[in-house]
Each structure stands twice: as structure tokens, then as C-alpha cells.
Image: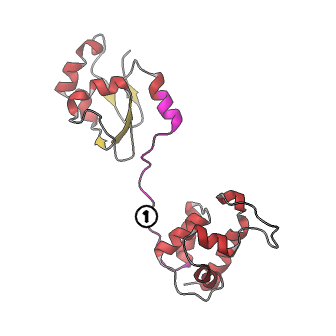
């Protein structure tokens, strides 16, 4: 573990942040720029003494959990987070899983296209949002009346007999059934 480099890195990152950057009140005048050690320790849910020992290059090797907490408290980028773990002599934990929330503009887009069935999936193809036409088209492929997030999207469903029979009138005039991929869709109007 490169204690001196780790301590220098933490001090530099702490000096780069302002209280307003992390949602803290500015408080009284500061002698030095950036956050105080107490503020970083509070944001990382650790003791001030332990953080001070790490930052002064005299503490034990921090655990991956502590490093993750420090990375969050100091608002590190993914590259800085990886650098922090390497300085501490440990391998970084895998990044968190895919986002499971739909951004407001995507939800608004779903509401604005009622004439086309649309679903939003995450990186693992779990359905996390849909519009009413999509719910009507794929109602036969689900068991829950609320079609909760977590239902997996299978692109083969677009050609499934149950879906095809429920949408026959909608597909009339099309060259074939709609095809769907994670990036693009070809739907007839």
C-alpha cells in the first residue's frame, strides 16, 4: 500500500470539494479550501479519528467498504475511484448494477407515443417501464395485472403466437410482425 500517495490523493480531493458540492451548509469562514476532515468522515459514515489516520498516512489498510464510502463522500469519478483502490493496494469492487429507474424525459416520451407499443428495458433486459399499448399487446405474456418491473423482455415475444393473435388487426398492412432490439425498433404505423 502506498500510504503517502493515498494520503496525498485524499487531501487533494478533499480540498477540491466545497460544502455546497455535497449538500452541506457553508458554515463559518474556513482557513483552508475544501471540506473539513470531520465533514468527509460524516459523509463516509466513519470516525473522524480513523479518517485522519488514513489521511496522515499512519492508519491501517482501509477495507473495500471504507474505500467505497470515501469514493462516494469525495464524489470521485470512476477513474479516480479505481485509482483510490489501487493506491490502497486492493482491487476495486465491481461497479453497481444497471440503473433501474426511468428518467423523466423517457417516461414523458412513453406518454407521448400512445399509437405505438413501447417498453423500456435495463441492461439485463428487465422491463422497467411501458406504455398502455405495450401493456395491452403483451398482456398474455404476464401473470400479474400490474406487470411490475423485473419482468424480462424476450425479443422473441414479438413473434409469439399469443402476441401475434392479439395484435393481428394492428399488424394488417405491415410487411410482417414488428421486430425489436434494444436500440432500434421497426413498427408499422
Task: Provide the residue designation for mark 1.
Answer: 94
29 sits left or right of 159 in the view: right
Seen at 53% across and 69% down, the residue is: 69
Q: Pinpoint residue 20: horizontal percent, then vertical percent.
A: 71, 57
Answer whether residue 73 is magenta in the image: no
Seen at 68% across and 58% down, the residue is: 21
Q: Pinpoint residue 128: horizontal percent, then vertical percent.
A: 38, 40
58 sits left or right of 29 in the view: left
Vertical relation: 112 (above or below) 17: above
Please tell me in which quadrant of the rendered image residue 40 appears.
bottom right
Residue sitting nearer the eye, 19 or 153: 19
66 sits left or right of 18 in the view: left
> Could you tell me what secondary structure mostly forms the magenta stretch?
loop
Residue sitting nearer the eye, 181 or 3: 3
Vertical relation: 128 (above or below) 71: above
Number of numbered discs overlaid on the protein picture: 1
Please tell me in which quadrant of the rendered image residue 11 appears.
bottom right
Vertical relation: 37 (above or below) 4: above
161 sits left or right of 61 in the view: left
**Crowdedness of circle 1 by 10 Å Cα count: few (<14), some, many (20+)?**
few
Residue sitting nearer the eye, 134 or 82: 134
Residue sitting nearer the eye, 145 or 82: 145
What is the image's colouring? secondary structure
| Location of the N terminus (image quadrant) | bottom right
Seen at 74% across and 67% down, the residue is: 34
* Residue span colored magenta: 88-109
Q: Pinpoint residue 42: horizontal percent, then vertical percent.
A: 60, 70
Answer whether residue 108 is magenta in the image: yes
- Pick out the residue farthest to the bottom: 58
Vertical relation: 135 (above or below) 59: above
Amino acid at each position: 500500500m502506498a500510504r503517502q500517495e493515498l494520503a496525498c490523493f485524499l487531501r487533494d480531493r478533499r480540498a477540491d470539494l466545497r460544502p455546497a458540492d455535497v449538500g452541506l451548509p457553508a458554515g463559518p469562514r474556513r482557513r483552508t479550501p475544501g471540506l473539513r476532515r470531520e465533514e468527509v468522515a460524516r459523509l463516509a459514515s466513519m470516525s473522524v479519528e480513523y479518517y485522519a489516520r488514513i489521511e496522515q498516512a499512519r492508519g491501517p489498510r482501509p477495507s473495500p467498504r471504507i474505500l467505497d464510502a470515501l469514493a462516494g463522500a469525495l464524489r470521485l469519478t470512476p477513474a479516480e475511484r479505481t485509482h483510490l483502490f489501487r493506491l490502497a493496494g486492493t482491487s476495486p469492487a465491481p461497479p453497481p448494477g444497471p440503473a433501474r429507474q426511468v428518467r423523466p424525459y423517457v417516461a414523458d416520451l412513453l406518454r407521448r407515443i400512445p399509437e405505438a407499443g413501447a417498453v423500456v428495458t435495463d441492461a439485463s433486459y428487465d422491463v422497467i417501464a411501458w406504455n398502455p399499448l405495450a401493456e395491452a399487446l403483451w398482456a398474455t405474456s404476464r401473470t400479474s395485472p400490474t406487470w411490475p418491473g423485473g419482468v424480462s423482455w424476450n425479443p422473441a415475444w414479438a413473434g409469439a403466437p399469443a402476441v401475434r393473435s392479439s395484435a393481428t388487426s394492428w399488424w394488417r398492412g405491415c410487411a410482417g410482425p414488428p421486430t425489436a432490439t434494444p436500440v432500434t425498433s421497426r413498427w408499422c404505423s
